[in-house]
């Protein structure tokens, strides 16, 4: 626009100068004054023409330079984002970037206890899942160190954290997008009680592979990182499935870093009802074996296609003057049923019925997974295998012995809560004081049904 204006002014100026020469020629004939005026005019015309030439050259060069810088800048940005990804350095995103990527947080793909998850696409084309953390009051320093811990882990069965954002008091985590959602909707017929669309029934082979993938992810966190990383929230909702139905463990929101030489730590209760190891409640301190316990529960849930704790209806008939039928609900603890069936050599009865109807399942494999799961569920953390051993057992390099009858299984007290019998209620940072077992500790009546021998007696 500027260029056009300047060109028009220059053309008008030249025309005006030419008009002056012509007018001078008519009025002054070939006098000295005419030659003087014509000389000045011609010099001015030449000056304007020179100005136009120099200006257009300058503009052309400037345009070339700008486009060169733009393309170099774009390349640099792409290179930089590539290097960041390779190095695993989390990017700090601006809120506007995330708003643009998620189209104003429009496409929600999930909601968990700690926030909502939205699908988005970054400027470089990568698909992401943006988790908006809600309700958790975390300081920026604490949030950043958590981000750094997550970003430092690199394993194909662990979700990658691309970056984070903490504008004002809001907190966002930006993960790689995993297309097939979480395991719960692929193993529980009711889609994990979340009324979510999608999902289906994972085949036996796929479940077996998921069991190996999750074991590898946990083994890496426990044994192969600089500090031991305890996940502390292993459950089907935190196991995502990629395009090939391979497992990717996510949600490190509750994870804890402990030094390699530290065997146990005492911390506030965190995790999800139904997946908490007994030591959370027995003041023994927790360790990587607490993840092993949760993994054992997930294994059984995958085999059976049902939650570890379910509330089932039982009919009770009361005879007073009239016969009344009353429906009562009781808690059913799947590991106890599994243990009983295994001792009776009827393991196929615990396998997800949908699988039995559809395919031939190797009983040896079922027996192996059940035994591994029951080893992981041993009440004493010391008796449980570590995750490296679990991989050896599942992949068949180490024989799996029949696990001993665990004397007592403590299903977390919180899971006995009416609403929590689905096993999806998350508990975060409950001070241990609330459940401290004192010398004269008496179990509330509800707990007598949940602190009970695993084997039928
Ligand atoms: N990286 C991802 N790619 C694709 N979908 C995801 C991703 N992360 C989470 N989701 C979806 O969002 C849902 C909720 O995720 P979130 O981690 O908040 O859930 P949660 O584990 O159930 O919650 P909680 O925080 O209570 O443990 C998941 O179950 C999954 O369907």
Image (tube, rainbow, N blue to C red):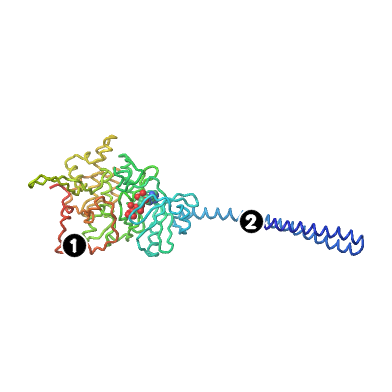
| In this picture, residue 366 sits left or right of residue 91 | left
Give the quarter of the image for residue 27.
bottom right
Q: Position of residue 452 (x, y in %)?
A: 16, 52
- Mark 2: give few (<14), some (14-19) or many (20+) Cα within 10 Å: few
Mark 2 vs 1: CB contact within 8 A: no
| In this picture, residue 97 sits left or right of residue 342 | right
Outermost front residue:
321
Task: Identify the mark nearer the N-term, 2 or 1.
Answer: 2
Tell me how far mark 2 sits from mark 1, CA to CA.
74 Å
Residue situated in front as seen by the camera: 152 or 128: 128
Looking at the rendered structure, the secondary structure element under dot 2 is helix
Residue situated in front as seen by the camera: 167 or 75: 167
Q: Which mark is residue 399?
A: none
The reply to whether residue 158 is in sight is no
Looking at the rendered structure, the secondary structure element under dot 1 is loop
Under 8 Å from ligand 1: the CB of mark 1? no
- Mark 1: give few (<14), some (14-19) or many (20+) Cα within 10 Å: some
Residue situated in front as seen by the camera: 108 or 230: 108
Residue at image point 7% right, 46% down: 321
| In this picture, residue 380 sits left or right of residue 160 | left
Q: Position of residue 253 (x, y in %)?
A: 35, 57
Residue situated in front as seen by the camera: 79 or 356: 356
**Residue bearing the label numbered 1:** 437
Outermost left residue:
321
Residue at image point 82% right, 61% down: 43
The reply to whether residue 122 is in sight is yes
Q: Which mark is residue 65?
A: 2
């Amino acid at each position: 626009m500027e260029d056009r204006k300047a060109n028009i002014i220059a053309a008008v100026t030249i025309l005006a100068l030419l008009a002056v020469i012509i007018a001078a020629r008519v009025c002054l004939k070939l006098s000295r004054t005419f030659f003087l005026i014509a000389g000045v005019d011609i010099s001015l015309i030449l000056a304007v023409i020179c100005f136009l030439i120099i200006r257009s050259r300058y503009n052309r060069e400037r345009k070339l330079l700008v486009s060169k810088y733009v393309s170099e800048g774009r390349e640099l940005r792409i290179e930089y984002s590539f290097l960041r990804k390779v190095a695993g350095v989390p990017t700090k995103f601006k809120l506007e970037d995330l708003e643009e990527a998620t189209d104003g947080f429009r496409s929600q793909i999930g909601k968990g206890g700690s926030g909502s998850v939205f699908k988005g696409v970054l400027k470089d084309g990568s698909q992401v899942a943006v988790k908006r953390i809600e309700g958790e009051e975390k300081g920026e320093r604490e949030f950043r160190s958590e981000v750094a811990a997550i970003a430092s882990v690199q394993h194909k069965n662990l979700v990658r954290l691309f970056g984070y954002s903490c504008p004002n008091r809001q907190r966002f985590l930006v993960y790689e997008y995993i297309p097939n959602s979480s395991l719960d909707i692929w193993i529980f017929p009711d889609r994990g009680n979340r009324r979510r669309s999608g999902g289906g029934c994972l085949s036996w082979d796929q479940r077996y592979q998921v069991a190996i993938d999750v074991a590898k992810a946990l083994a890496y966190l426990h044994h192969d990182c600089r500090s031991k990383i305890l996940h502390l929230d292993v459950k089907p909702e935190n196991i995502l499935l990629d395009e090939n139905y391979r497992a990717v463990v996510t949600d490190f929101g509750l994870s804890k870093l402990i030094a390699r030489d530290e065997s146990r730590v005492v911390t506030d209760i965190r995790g999800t009802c139904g997946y908490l190891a007994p030591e959370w409640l027995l003041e023994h301190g927790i360790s990587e074996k607490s993840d092993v316990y949760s993994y054992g529960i997930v294994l059984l849930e995958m085999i059976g296609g049902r939650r570890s704790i379910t509330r089932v209806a039982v009919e009770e008939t009361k005879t007073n003057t009239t016969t009344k039928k009353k429906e009562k609900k009781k808690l059913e603890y799947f590991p106890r049923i599994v243990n009983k069936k295994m001792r009776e050599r009827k393991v196929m009865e615990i396998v997800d019925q949908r699988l039995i109807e559809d395919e031939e399942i190797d009983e040896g494999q079922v027996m192996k997974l059940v035994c591994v799961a029951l080893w992981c569920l041993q009440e004493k953390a010391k008796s449980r295998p570590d995750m490296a051993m679990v991989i050896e057992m599942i992949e068949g390099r180490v024989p799996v012995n029949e696990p001993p009858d665990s004397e007592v299984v403590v299903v977390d007290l919180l899971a006995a809560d009416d609403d929590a019998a689905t096993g999806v209620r998350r508990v975060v940072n409950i001070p241990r004081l609330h459940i401290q077992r004192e010398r004269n500790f008496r179990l509330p009546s509800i707990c007598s049904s949940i602190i009970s021998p695993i084997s039928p007696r």
